[in-house]
Amino acid sequence: MPMTVRVLISDKMDPRAAAIFRDRGIEVDERPGLTPEELKSIIGDYDGLAIRSATKVTKPILEAATNLKVVGRAGIGVDNVDIPAATARGVVVMNTPFGNSITTAEHAIALMFALARQLPEADASTQAGKWEKNRFMGVEVTGKTIGLIGAGNIGSIVATRALGLRMKVAAYDPFLTPERAVELGVDKVELDELLRRADFITLHTPLTDQTRNILSRENLAKTKKGVRIVNCARGGLIDEQALKEALDSGHVAGAALDVFETEPATASPLFGTPGFISTPHLGASTSEAQVNVAIQVAEQMSDYLLLGGVTNAINMPSLSAEEAPRLRPYMALAENLGKLAGQILGEDVRSVAVEVEGAAAALNQKPITGAVLAGLMGTYSQTVNMVNAPFLAKERGLDVKEVRHDREGDYHTLVAVEVGTSHGVRRVAGTLFGNKAPRLVEMFGVEVEAELTGSMIYIVNTDAPGFIGKLGTALGEAGINIATFNLGRRAAGGEAVALVAVDGDVPPAVVGTLSKLEGVREVVPLRF
Ligand SMILES: NC(=O)c1ccc[n+]([C@@H]2O[C@H](COP(=O)([O-])OP(=O)(O)OC[C@H]3O[C@@H](n4cnc5c(N)ncnc54)[C@H](O)[C@@H]3O)[C@@H](O)[C@H]2O)c1
Ligand SMILES: O=C(O)[C@H](O)COP(=O)(O)O
């Protein structure tokens, strides 16, 4: 019976998201407006969580999310998700980076015009029957300079619209290349120059440690007198108290905020300040954008939950739904190679090199490496998986290397794992039979051919006549049935290895008995 996959939609989302989940055989509950306590009490039932900006996916929520595999953000900003905590728990976090960009850029332009012509105040005054024609003197935007702080997806769209309005565009974005600036038709400038030159400033960066308070009191003081400021990006980018004072003093002629440091912003010192306009985080709120992001997030989450495809993940490399089935047997092979090395070598692991050759070299290597690390570290950590394995490896200071060989080897496809320990480098390698069945083909320099499956015993002994018989007898006397027997040796009479698949677990007492057989150097029970 296929397992039921369940998704919770915890923010208001276009109904097309739920329809897509259902069409793809996923059970879905729509529960916008849950309190953090309510969310915490039910999140354990779900494999996926679809959100916008209202749901806060905090560490305590993630700790209660014992089945959660993916958080999907129908939108761009993921600052409401504790990404390190999600990664540490092996939960993929994905967003929809383009679905609402045009809509948000249009909102920034709308707010710029609202400031330039004082539209909200003029509207309120007129509807109050005052007809104050002389009170509302506006400014033209044509020929003025708009300064973009952040010129990514949304900032770039704002630039094209502003150029269409015959404005001059200056952009401060340390990651904007000079070539891209030329292509966009904007002046790439330093922040101080932007502050000095801009008649309008619009913010389009994420909220990070570098961008927090980027329009600080000090930077606001560097702006041109009469500047107008728009923020459709994130609260926290502007010092709200300093902005209020700059509006009161008349240094800043107008400010329009769609986003606030604390949301929902039901109170703010800015409210009621002349020249101040606000909207309640409406940047992405058009029917077009909401349909885009709902469809996209539901498709992405379904691809991950049902097929293993990863798109637009913040904490994992991409893997298309088409690639995923081709990679699946490789990931099974890679995970088992990691498990084999991990169970035999224990925690004495300093470096890991994952090598691919033949058909494997044509594939996306990141998921293969992730699976090796998950297998390797899964032997000493219960919570490791493909998502958090690279992160945990980094945390442990493991030196991880990926090598892709163009050469033709003995196998049509090969994945090899070289593990550096305090005793030197140990290597295991495997291939796929018929492009789908994983097989171990090399173990610590010895050629073997074994399916890594179920319960197995790894034995190193001195090659000698009669050993296999004694081993079989010892297992038989312990009531352990042998399923398959795989042998390899360095040289006749030299070191030999056996990988014995058995039915059921191998108790420590049996490991002790086998260790005492003549010529035995090492016995390790294994689980795959
Ligand atoms: N108001 C809304 O409803 C709404 C809707 C969509 C997006 N947003 C927000 O808008 C922001 C921008 O979204 P985007 O899609 O353009 O993101 P993006 O990632 O495409 O662009 C962000 C840009 O900021 C730049 N940047 C990063 N650090 C910087 C720094 N220290 N100084 C200057 N620039 C810096 C990056 O280089 C990048 O080019 C995000 O915060 C997003 O959450 C808000
Ligand atoms: O980052 C975003 O996509 C916007 O802030 C939109 O947020 P919302 O989905 O809550 O409207």
Image (cartoon, rainbow, N blue to C red):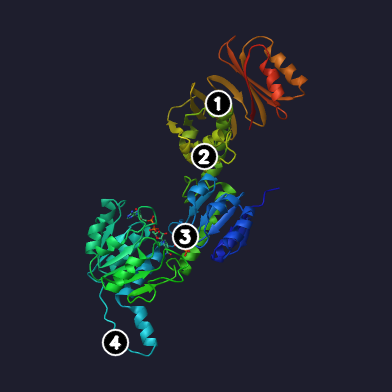
Q: CA distance from mark 4 to mark 1?
A: 82 Å
Residue 365 percent location from the top left of the image: 47, 37
Residue 425 percent location from the top left of the image: 48, 23
Report the front residue among 302 and 252: 252
| Element type where label 3 sits in the image | loop
**Amino acid at dot 2:** Ala
Residue that appears at 31% across and 87% down = 132
Residue that badge 2 annotates: 389
Residue that badge 4 annotates: 133
Q: CA distance from mark 1 to mark 2?
A: 18 Å
Residue that badge 1 annotates: 345
Q: How many marks?
A: 4
Q: Earlier in the sequence, mark 3 or mark 4?
A: 3
Q: Is mark 2 within 8 Å of ligand 1?
A: no
| 3 vs 4, front mark | 4
Q: Earlier in the sequence, mark 3 or mark 2?
A: 3
Residue that appears at 39% across and 54% down = 208
Residue that badge 3 annotates: 75
User: How many other residues sit within 10 Å of disc 1, few (<14), some (14-19) or many (≥20)?
Assistant: some
Residue 435 appears in the picture as rendered: no
Q: CA distance from mark 1 to mark 3?
A: 44 Å
Is the residue under label 1 in contact with that under label 4 (CB below 8 Å)? no
| 3 vs 2, front mark | 2
Q: CA distance from mark 2 to mark 4?
A: 65 Å
Q: Earlier in the sequence, mark 2 or mark 4?
A: 4
Instruction: Please tell me the numbered disc located at residue 205.
Output: none
Horizontally, residue 110 falls left or right of residue 329, namely left
Q: What is the quadrant of the C terminus in the image?
A: top right
